[in-house]
Image: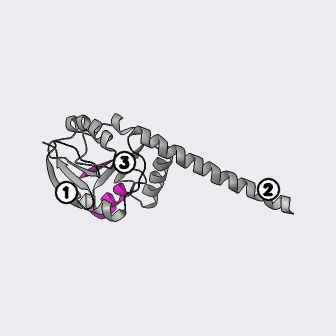
Amino acid sequence: MLIDRLMALVPIGCLVLLGAVVGIVSILWTDLKGAPYVATPRQTVRRMLELAEVGSQDVVYDLGSGDGRVLWIAAQELGARAVGIEIDPFRYGWTRLLIRLKRLNQQVVVIRKDFFQVDLSAATVVSAYLLRDTNLKMMEKLASELPIGARVVSRKYQFPGWNLVREDPVEELYVYRME
């Protein structure tokens, strides 16, 4: 009887262990690719989009879109179209599922790719919560691909030397306009 109970727990324990290993590898992998996954609170996402003045005419690109909260808040609450770029296959899959469940297939797309490899020229707003070094590496790409007037909203880390048009120092949010 005790052996039966232990055997019944083994699959659950294995699944928990496998899930933990996958989670740790996922975090480390995305960290190496530009930024670890750190979920931005929904109220901070709303503030980011508000500062960037996102509206129904915008196409919001979220670099490292994680669980997709920037995408679906931009689409559902502000009427924007949204494109997420996520390299992690698990977060990518989760975001696709949420898009379907929220019935946002016409407004939201998620791409499973390295954001350094994606053409950003269709974006009117880019959302970035990356690392300081990753922001510095992204500067040339953003400057060469984004149209004049596009906004870049960054959480935590700035883009030094760019045209800062709005900020929220408490939330560490910075909005830049491309010139």
Residue mark closest to the camera, 1 vs 3 = 1
Magenta stretch in the rendered image: 57-78
The numbered mark, 1 or 3, whose residue comes first in the sequence reads 3
Q: Residues within 10 Å of mark 2 (few under 14, many from 20)?
A: few
Q: Is residue 94 left or right of residue 50?
A: right
- Looking at the rendered structure, the kind of residue marked 3 is Gly
Q: Is residue 61 magenta?
A: yes
* Residue displayed at 79% across by 56% down: 7
Depicted 148 relative to depicted 8: above or below? above
Q: Quadrant of residue 148?
A: top left
Whether pointer 3 and pointer 2 mark residues with C-beta atoms closer than 8 Å, the reply is no
Q: Estimate the x, y position of residue 13 in percent, counting from the top left.
A: 69, 55
Tell me which amino acid carries mark 1.
Glu
Question: Which residue matches tag 3?
Answer: 84
Q: Please name the residue that numbered disc 2 is placed on.
A: 7
Q: Which residue is mark 1?
A: 167
